[in-house]
Image (cartoon, grey):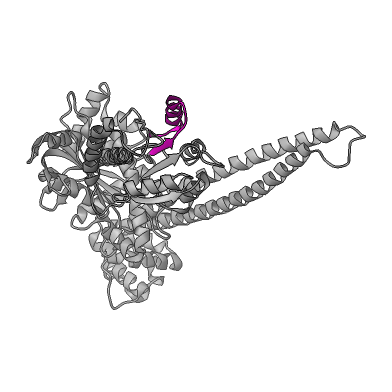
Amino acid sequence: DSQPMATSGFARPRSSSTLARRESDLSSKAVSRLGDDETIVILSVDDDIVNQEVIKTALSDRYEIHVAMNGFEALEFFSTRSKLPDLVLLDVMMPGMDGFDVLRTIRDEKNILPTTLPVIMLSAMEPVDKAVLRSLKSGANDYVSKPFDPDILKARVNTAVEIKRLRLIENESFHHSRLLHDILPTHIVERLVLGEKCISERHDSVCMLFADIVGWTTMSESVPTHQLVDLLNSLFSAFDELTEKHGVFKAETIGDAYIVAAGHEGQAGPSDATLRVVEYGLNMLEKVKSIRPPRGMQLQIRVGIHTGSAYSGVVGAKVPKYTFFGDTVNTAARMETMGLPGCVNMSRSCQESLAKEIAACRSGCLLEDWLNSIGASLVQRDPVEVKGKGVMDMFIICPRGMSPRLARNLSLQISRHSSESIDTVSSENEGLPSSETKLLLELDALRQQRDMLQVSERSAWSEVESLQQSLASLNTKLTESTSTAPSFASASPSPQDVSTNHQVEELKLQLLVTTKSLMRARQTLLDKEAEIDGLELELERVKAKLERRSSLEGHGMNLDKAPTQGRRGSFMARTHSLLGSTATPSDFPLGMASMSSPSSRRLSSMSIREFDEVGSDVDEMTPNTNSLST
């Protein structure tokens, strides 16, 4: 079909009858495979009514024919319809706009490729060879000379439609293959292509990562559904990009949980699976900072990692999934559950594997040196009781900008209350000394927000300086243009000066808007600084309370609150129990001067106001006494 075929008239010559019949039969079979419910639309562009009738007679039994009597009607057909035709039969010699102009508009201006829209040129131009060459160079798929044989025209049309169908199948197959490589590892896809039905594998060392959003249940109840979907789409799309960067496999997403694996590929040489997954987890924490959460919500994730042996296999026929099984999967999920917001929590086996891989892949580099190079720090937690696993050793990787002290305080809470998640522990204060920890957590979040605001403020200030420089340059240019103009010149400014004036006005408006943005950024930054100062003062007050409380406990005072007495009475009663029978509550504070014990002398130096303040502090902290260590 690559060689155009010309006929001498509507009556088919005897010499070409067999060839035309064969071509028509083969093409008819090809078109029959397109499906009975699929309508194929053909646009016939010709100014000759007789030719249009012949085309309708030859093709209307299989195709839907639309007619355009000139090039302008053909282009209007493209503009008014939302869907392109499947094929175009285009006459060359037409009044107003010939076929070459129409074809040039389709290919160049509308940017419709020959693979998307086949075009067959119809013409009686002489010489035929030059007409064919010009048509093909202009973007035509085929050429038929007039007068044409209806059977040969029908065969050519059927062949063009079949070629287009095969191209669509090829494109669809490519997209399916790409999707298959996205949901399955490459080596598994290769085994499926070879015809394997049941695929299962055992891996000696696989690194699994679990991550989920802190407070997702509360967020899902208070935030509209479309905002939640937008949030998950933005977050998971960012995570998907990181999988390509670090060469890890996205195993699954369940609700707000995101699961990643590495080490199952069976690569040659030293493995770096744990290193890739840990780097991926730290980059996840950085990506979260760039995602804008719903108004009034704070977006944080927990990340848990474990390295160990596992099994994997392809499950399902309609939507096959590459799934991991074994204790490593469950342990990685526990690492995430026992993790801290904004940190990477990993098991001892993961920490040991990470240290070995860093030493092997980074020329003997130590784990601590590698963490220092990326601005992170490692904190070893106290042994934690894990449901179904017993007591486990865990390590926390604190990313850049997070205090290791904060991570250790939070991990202590989890160690004491391992059956509860960190968000539950943080929200409930009964029986827990979490005032300081809560303040540290809030303070750390506010400082991160302040740092981001400082970056925005510096960016706005740089933009203001740039605009000021541009404005000064334009004003200088305008002044020089005015000073160099001859005295006999017209009073009206030159076009160049008018253009410069317009640029000056636009820059002034832009500078005004940017300056207002800068002022808003600075005000927001000042408000954030005020919040930080307030929290720091509150933190100091809490620390002072704890120190005074520890001091009183060191003197042997009983801090159990008497339920039937008031603030001063209850504190004095406890003090009386310390001093013995030498004084009674009625002797306070006048009887304090005659007390002879060392504790009495210390208390006698207090004023009445200081005495009441200490009593107030102790009473406020008494509900948490049972869970505080001395």
Residue at the image point whose x is 9% and y is 39% from the top: 199
**Residue 209 percent across, percent down from the top left:** 22, 43
| Left or right: 460 as drawn, with respect to 493 | left
- The quarter of the image holding the C terminus is bottom left
Q: Quadrant of residue 12?
A: top left
Q: Residue at image x 17%, y 36%?
A: 189
- Judged from this view, the residue extending furthest toward the bottom is 564
Q: Position of residue 552 (x, y in %)?
A: 32, 59
Residue 128 sits in quarter: top left
Q: Closest to the observer: 393 or 578?
A: 393
Percent x, y of residue 432: 27, 60
Judge whether residue 292 is colored magenta: no
Q: What is the x, y in percent for residue 595? A: 35, 65
Q: Is residue 578 above or below residue 231?
A: below
Total labels: the figure holds 0
Q: Is residue 30 above or below residue 533?
A: above
Residue 134: in magenta span: yes
Q: Is residue 21 left or right of residue 109?
A: left
Q: Is residue 403 visible?
A: no
Magenta stretch, residue numbers:
119-142
Depth check, front residue: 162 or 352: 162
Q: Nearer the viewer, residue 541 or 410?
A: 410
Locate the N terminus by quadrant: top left
Q: Quadrant of residue 401?
A: top left
- Position of 3 with respect to 609 (left or right) is left
